Image: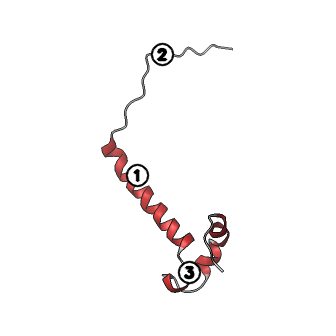
Amino acid sequence: MTDAVLDSTVMPLPLPVRELMPWAIFGGLLMLLAIYFVGAEEGATSLIPGMYVHEFVHDGRHLLGFPCH
């Protein structure tokens, strides 16, 4: 077996905020969309007709504490 030698002078490269910010915004928008579908896509606020979205996220709605019936 060979022994691994770790160099203690290796430092991680900094990640510029300018490169990270578009991905953070995109992820935040996806999370807001998911919260809308799990929490509010039902009844009067429904954007999609029918109960398909409600039934798809029904267990997640209860798991996160959103009332639905």
Would residue 13 appear left or right of 8 to someone viewing this image?
Answer: left
- Residue occupying image coordinates x 65% and y 73%: 58
- Residue occupying image coordinates x 44% and y 56%: 27
N-term mark: 1 or 2: 2
Distance in Å between CA atoms under marks 1 and 2: 31 Å
What residue is disc 1 on? 24
- Residue occupying image coordinates x 42% and y 28%: 12
The amino acid type found where label 1 is placed reads Ala
Q: Is residue 47 above or below residue 11?
A: below
What residue is disc 3 on? 42
Q: Check disc 3 and report its element: helix, strand or loop.
A: loop
Mark 1, other Cα within 10 Å: few <14 / some 14–19 / many ≥20:
few
Mark 3, other Cα within 10 Å: few <14 / some 14–19 / many ≥20:
many
Would residue 21 appear left or right of 51 to someone viewing this image?
Answer: left
The amino acid type found where label 2 is placed reads Ser
What residue is disc 2 on? 8
- Residue occupying image coordinates x 35% and y 52%: 22
Do the numbered discs 1 and 2 sit on residues whose CB atoms are within 8 Å? no
